Amino acid sequence: MNFFKKKRFNLVLTTLLVLSLFLAIYIPSFAQPSRVKNVILLIGDGMGTEQVNLGRIHKGDSLYMDEFDYTGTASTYSADPGNKWVTDSAAAGTALATGVKTYAGAISVDLNQKPIETILEKAQKNKKSTGIVTTTRVTHATPACFASHNINRGNETEIAVDIIENKVDVILGGGKVNFIDKKDGGKRKDGRNLIEEAKNIGYKYIETKNDLKNIDDGKILGLFNNSHINYKLDRNSSVEPNLEEMTNKAIDILSKNNKGFFLMVEGGRIDHAAHGNDPGTMVNEVLDFDEAVKAAYEFAKKDKQTLVIVTADHETGGLSIGANDKYEYYPEVLKGQRKSIEYLSEIITISNYKAVIKDELGINDLTKKEESEITLALENKNKRDIFEILTNIMNTRSNTGWTSLAHTGVDVPVKAYGPNAELFSKHLDNTDINKLAILSMKLK
């Protein structure tokens, strides 16, 4: 080799070595993600981009989830042979819990109704602690997908058995009704009291906010309502904990395991309020969820070994900020709401409706048409009509739009913070979220 060829060869070799070193230093996570000790997956049920945006507007400031370094989106379609494009929470929850798409109503079973191992179960096999926290019944579709297997999401008394038998370390939410027998006011028909059975295998049972404050270790079963935990607007804050309080407690307990933990946190009632097209109640649920995001974010900032993922299972309601061919929106209307429309529909009467609407919705300018509609519905004792009239009052005055009382097929936000968070900064499928979390924890 002559002098000039040798010099050129050495230059190329040096360039390749420098490039290899650069790739190894600056983008190792794309080729070989670093090991993550803990994963906290927060799911805003029904929380599309517009729900997040309305939360930001209502707060008048950025959300805690806006502090995250990386943002992406995720598709939500299922594998339902009937219509896959608009998912339900069970199929979407299964995708997030297992990385496998399935049919509507399936709780972590595949299209052949065979159980699929969940990320929570994989974490248990790797000696990590596990938890589920939710504002719904703990047996409801999303939390159920992480800790049980069933061919039908409606089999909540069966799901309750699974959750206890799977020995999830921390279980916090509502749904006491599915753990106790009918004779005791529950829904069980088998005579079993799963609360007592849980105690017998080492669980500490709690059912009030004060109980939650006074417990700091061990396996915990916390059921704070017979059904779902009340909406933020309706909650008895001296009895029912909020999502942030439950999340903080779960993190405190689970983080005692030096092998790490997996925790799923669900803001489940964003979806319920959106199903009712009740924007004031819904936006308060978004902010309640964001406080739980704060709890996870603050822990991860200090811990440095925790990956926090925020996403949704689907969007609900087809929310639009602005409607009716008008370039207008009046968020201050929603700030006057003090109780959910679901709650108001139960207490309103012909004699009190004007006072209730003024005091609890902040509306004191009912039209003659609205008064007539309310009076007629109350005379007919039609609570569904009352509900619709009250939501129409709030939506019309705020100019909030909805396209549906059901779910929609739009993409949902994905936000991530902590080690490997950059892996989530693109468009993903919902199944990818599961796979990347498992990859990050290196679960087998």
Image (cartoon, helix red, strand yellow):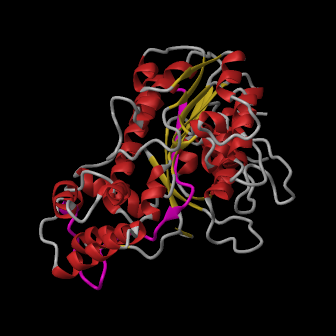
State the residue in front, 233 or 287: 233
Q: Is residue 440 visible?
A: no
State the residue in front, 396 or 53: 396
Residue at the far bottom in the pictured view? 325
State the residue in front, 137 or 72: 137
Left or right of residue 351: residue 119: right
Q: Which residue is rendered at x = 62% and y = 26% of the image?
A: 261
Q: Main secondary structure of the magenta part?
A: loop
Q: Which residue is rendered at x = 21% and y = 57% of the image?
A: 356
Q: Is residue 319 magenta?
A: yes
Left or right of residue 58: residue 212: right
Q: Which residue is rendered at x = 33% and y = 50% of the image?
A: 284
Residue 175's image quarter?
top right
Q: Which residues are magenta?
A: 304-333
Q: Is residue 270 visible?
A: yes
Left or right of residue 197: residue 48: left
Q: How many marks?
A: 0
**Image coordinates for residue 355, horizontal then vertical, percent:** 16, 59
Residue 202's image quarter?
top right
**Image coordinates for residue 121, horizontal then vertical, percent:** 74, 34
**Image coordinates for residue 383, horizontal then vertical, percent:** 40, 66
Q: Is residue 433 magenta?
A: no
Q: Which residue is rendered at x = 39% and y = 47% of the image?
A: 231
Left or right of residue 220: residue 113: right
| 392, above or below 218, in the image | below
